[in-house]
Amino acid sequence: MAYGDIARSTTGVLRRLPWWTGPIAVTAALVGFGIYVFVTVMLFDRGEYENYLSPFYSPPVGGESFLPAWLSPAIFILWLPLGFRATCYYYRKAYYRAFFWDPPACSSKAQQRELRGPEHYRGETALFVWNNIHRYFMYGSFVLLVFLTIDTVRAFLPEGSFGITLGSLIFLVNVSLLWTYSLSCHSLRHVIGGSVDCYSCVKGGNARRKAYNWLSVLNRQHALWAWLSLFSLLITDVYIRLLLAGVITDFRLV
Amino acid sequence: MSDSAAEQKGMASKAHAEVHSDEEATLEGKSYRLKIFRGDAEGGKEVEYEIEAIEGMVVLDAVLKIQAEQANDLAVRWNCKAAHCGSCSAEINGRPKLLCKTRVEEYEGQEIRVHPIRAFPVIKDLVSDVSWNYGVSAQIQPFTTSEQAPFTMYEEDVERLYEPKKCIECFMCQDVCHVLRTHHKHPEFAGPRFFVRSQWLEMHPKDEGNRLQFLKEGRGGVQLCNITKCCSEVCPVGIHITDNSIIPLKERVADEYYDPAKWLMRKIRGRRNGSSNGNGGTRSTHARAGIRTNG
Amino acid sequence: MDANGHANGSSPHEVREHDVLIIGAGGAGLRAAVAATERGLSVGVVTKSLLGKAHTVMAEGGIAASLGNVDPADGWQTHFKDTLKSGKFINNWRMAELFSKEAPDRVYELEQWGALFNRTAEGKISQRPFGAHTYRRLCHVGDRTGLELIRTMQEKVLATDTQVYMETAVTKLFKNSEGRVVGALAYTRETGKFIHFKTKAVVLATGGWGRIYKVTSNSWEGTGDGAVLAYDAGAELVDMEMVQFHPTGMVWPPGVRGLLVTEGVRGEGGLLRNSKGERYMERYDKERMELSSRDVVARANYTEVQEGRGSPHGGVFLDITHLGYRGIMKKLPTMHEQFLKLADIDISKEPMEVFPTIHYTMGGVKVDPETCATNVPGLFAAGEVAGGLHGANRLGGNSLSDLLVFGRRAGMGAAEYVKSNGYSTEIREEELNAEKKRVMAPLEKREGENPYKIQQELQETMMEHANLMRNEDSLKEGLGKVLALKDRLPNIGVGGSTLFNPGWHTAQDVRHLIQISEIIIRCALERTERRGAQWRLDYDGPDEELGRVNLISKKDQQGEVGIEKREIPPMPEHLAKLFEEGE
């Protein structure tokens, strides 16, 4: 198990880092992403270049007519993936640790730094009880994914016929990661099989069991998919912006 | 085997002496230093001990050696010494560990500071009073079925239950959980260990109990968990506590209490929350077993 | 609850009353508790550890019961025959009969209470092969069957009104003027406070005494408390010389020496090889090879090492690599983890090094098969502490079913006894105070001999003189050493207070260890033959005369170990007949 050895030595190294490195890194990444999205989406035009539509704007809805000039139509779309990620079981862990320091990390030293006192800690009972609607964001996200998949197909059709470009490959990677992230969702896993106690007692149980087991494999790395798909979104949008700005030209392979 | 009795006698008295002894395994001149918490409920301090190093030694070996040679009254819990019973949980350098499964070499070049688990009251030295856990366990509705064993159950239906069933009740997840450790929610929160137990009960094909009300409204307190996964990180038997026990339970609680579509369905079918059958998951009708440790 | 003792100057104690007091919270103790509680009695369970930590968790391979799920030809008759053959026919045949008939019900009962076993394709409980079982018979869940059993029983008990006294140790049983056991003195390990249990019956379920040896798979708890409590109360012990060596214990690193490697490894096809790469079991038991009975395999492993064909750390090789990583993770995950973590060995790639380790004690308190009553009224025993079922050698997997079958019978037996008897639970105050004084002595002495040191010396003595292979001269020498240690017992002194003081606890345990060791050696001297676990090098083979007797040891008038050879009653025809057919 070479993979195991690598994993072990990596975790060994990670374990020796001071406890605050984890929460700081997560905070930096999430805040950075937030700023990027806000600035680009609010201040720049729709990220559309030839047959590429930035995933932040898909599907293209809403007339610009009734919106104030400074507000981008992306807000009609963005709340959905934002909500999906904000209520995601992985991101919840990440922001409870990184933003709220509830707790920042697991060691006894880190737990002593917890910001909230026992009398104020409410867990997911007060405001965060809303995280329970995660499944509805999940349903919505799959609708969006259909559009993003169509966008990806379009990305492979420069000038109406099939062709492979660097941009289309970026689209493909991005949409695959988004699918993987969404399929590895805990709520989906629950809907498919987690809610069933006895597969052999329900109709279609065997198919559900197989799907559940498969989703469970993806679910094991949910955090990884969450981060990779976040970065791929960012890269896709940046790539389109660079094309729009004329900084680079699209590289065509086939 | 029909050698003469004289030869055999030699063989018998040599028995096992032939086999390697501790003395041969000591690492020449090498020693380890451990700082161990000595004290009781009133307080205490770290005391440093130095012991001879033995190859492959685990921290429990070191602690027992100190106990036998230097401090007879050093209190430590242990039983199987094989990571099967979960007795020897303690904190090494601020992280919960099974003393019997942690090699001393892992801390080469670092200090080794051994403390009792802190989410529960310290009794003495490395021993904490974990009896609270047994009280919580007694409040969970046990396995309940109207069917008569032998059951027909397929591997496919039960394969995911083996994982939560591996739990050895070391209570390290309880120790590291900030809801207990930092926020002291003991009266309203059952802790990861008992979510693990509730999960297999809830997912068991033959179980007809319902523990959702207990988990959401009762003393289970699953909503107090904010899934920060420290419990999963410390589990010595590798149960993915958060992903495979707590989140599935949270999803079931969401089904029951937070899903408008499901709520509507129930309204149409006429069933109350959290009580699909049974008594809603709390054992109010049972007198629970008395557990006492310190009289 | 009230506190006594202040008035006359001795340490105070608390009084607790129960109908039935069960000492020990392993499989047998908990099953007895359920049985007695079901009959409406007030039950107290005393355990030296926390609940659910009993040595039962170390049973890995499985629970033997002739369900016939995998091999339909299996039935209680075959299980009965296997048990007697393996026990070399000095078993109590009635116990073996009850045992093999009732084991399947006890397994199904566990399932009813929430235990989960691996399944067959038909959705039944899966069964695996094991040493010297004719058919595939061991119901199992991976390699942690004991954990499943103890957790199921623990949760069952927690759902009843049973009172559990965790981390509490009993030091003496009290009898009333009629000679009935009516109480016990215990101290809580946490605080050292004394509890006087007033009870109408006591069930001993304290397990074995593997801690008398240095290389053992037993936890610190296996100090034979129950056997000594019974012996002191005048109960008879049976075949105490019979101590089982498990063929496969870990040998390296030193800290884990003796740690069990489950027989499940051989059950799943593990091969034993010596340093020359030979599958040497063909020289010892050509037919059954690695799956021969434990005494045979243990002696084979021992002999290979003694004759210079051992592995680098003085063991033999046990190879399961052919199962591959996936197979091992499915069937033997705990073993994989154990070796990887503790010995840096990946058993899916390399063989393990193993050597016999002390595992189980077949001998124990003599009981009535139907009720588990001892010869002392009011005293019952079940599980490893009781003797008789396993004879000269226990079959793997028979222990877990033993716990349940006889745990239940002991609980029922005690309940019947309690209900049909009216008598006083009063004892003389002086007796109570004398015992408290004795228990406190090591603390009052303070500067004295280190109890750990005495324990170590005892363990080394037993290792050297009462091991796998025995002979008269060595046993006699060992007896001398044990008696010398016994004389040093009053010198023990420990520092510290009564607050969770392991030194003080060890001072109590070591007395039990020494008493048991003495009995074992004396019995081993009496059984001058080779039979099962008792292997006398100075005698050639089994002795027909001795094959018809049990060795009964009992405290005699002078307070010394009295040993009687007691004829085993002949097997009734319906059982004897089983051995004639097709043999």
Image (tube, coloured by chain):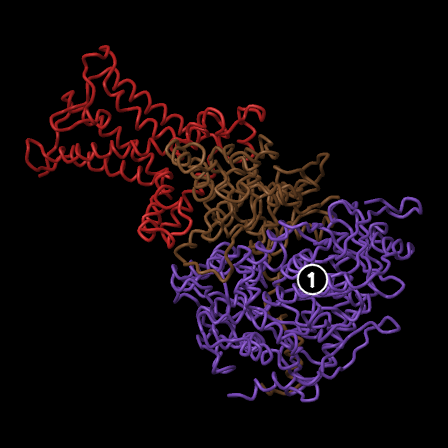
Q: Residue at x 85, y 74 (%)?
A: C556
Occupied quadrant, residue C296: bottom right
Q: Position of residue A70 (x, y in %)?
A: 24, 11
Instruction: Return the chain for callout 1.
Output: C
Amino acid at dot 1: Gly
Give left or right: position of C419 versus A130.
right
The answer to which image quadrant residue C541 occupies is bottom right
Tell me which residue sits at (33%, 41%) in the image: A184
Is C345 above or below relative to B222?
Answer: below
Name the residue beneath numbered marker 1.
C411
Q: Where is residue B175 in the image (x, y as percent from the top left)?
A: 57, 39
Relative to C350, is C500 on the left or the right? right
Q: Where is residue C391 in the image (x, y as percent from the top left)?
A: 65, 76
Q: Where is residue C179 in the image (x, y as percent from the top left)?
A: 86, 66
- Chain letter for the brown colouring in the rendering: B
Side of C510 relative to B93 (left or right): right
Which element carries disc 1, helix, strand or loop? helix
Q: Which chain is purple?
A: C
- Residue C446 visible in the displayed image: yes
The colour assigned to chain A within the rendered structure = red
